[in-house]
Image: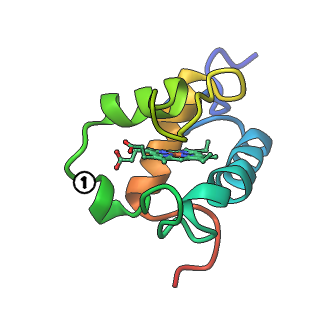
């Protein structure tokens, strides 16, 4: 019996594969409805690596989980767990959100 497996839960490797697909789908569809289909901005600001660069992970994760009161940015804590939000921020920073790079 193997005590250690490589199927780690959300951590450095992120959530399990199927959930990653779900989260990236949500990012493109739901977040994309405001932030632009390619997340280059729309009603909400662009979520590109250079735009996010000056912001800390804490601020970005908190924005995703709790929204920004007084702006259209809604809270997502009912749909997205904190470690999942952290993982999405990592993907956004990498500019790797699962669609062809343009
Ligand atoms: C209803 C429109 C709307 C939806 C849907 C939406 N956002 Fe936003 N979001 C905004 C707006 C507007 C802002 C800018 C708030 C402000 O003025 O500070 C924002 C800000 C942000 C920021 C902070 C950007 C920065 O530079 O500080 C992040 C990160 C973010 N959104 C991520 C997401 C993610 C991830 C999703 C999907 C899970 C999402 N948003 C869905 C409207 C939206």
Horizontal placement of 88 versus 17: left or right?
left
Nearest the eye: 19 or 9? 19
Residue at the far bottom in the pictured view: 102
> 35 above or below 78?
below
- State which quadrant residue 81 falls in: top right
**Screen quadrant of the N terminus:** top right
Q: Is residue 16 above or below residue 30?
A: above
**Residue that mark 1 sits on:** 53
Depth order, front residue of 71/61: 71
Q: Position of residue 84 (x, y in %)?
A: 58, 32
Direction from residue 60 to residue 35 in the image, left or right: right
Q: Position of residue 20 (x, y in %)?
A: 69, 45
Residue at x 51% of width, y 39% of height:
87
Q: Residues within 10 Å of mark 1 (few under 14, many from 20)?
A: few
Q: Is residue 78 left or right of residue 88?
A: right
Q: Going 72% across and 28% down the picture, which residue do you hit? A: 79
- Asked whether residue 73 is in view, the answer is yes
Where is residue 82? Give x, y as percent. 53, 22
* Figure coloring: rainbow
The residue positioned 62% from the left and 22% from the top of the image is 77
To which quarter of the image does residue 8 belong? top right
């Amino acid at each position: 019996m193997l005590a250690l497996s490589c199927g780690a839960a959300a951590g450095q490797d992120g959530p399990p594969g199927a959930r990653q697909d779900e989260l990236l789908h949500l990012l493109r569809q739901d977040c994309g409805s405001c932030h632009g289909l390619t997340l280059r901005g729309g009603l909400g600001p662009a979520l590109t690596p250079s735009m996010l660069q000056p912001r800390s992970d804490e601020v970005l994760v908190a924005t995703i989980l709790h929204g920004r009161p007084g702006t259209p940015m809604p809270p997502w804590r009912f749909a997205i767990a904190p470690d999942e939000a952290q993982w999405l921020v990592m993907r956004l920073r990498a500019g790797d959100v699962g669609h062809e790079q343009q």
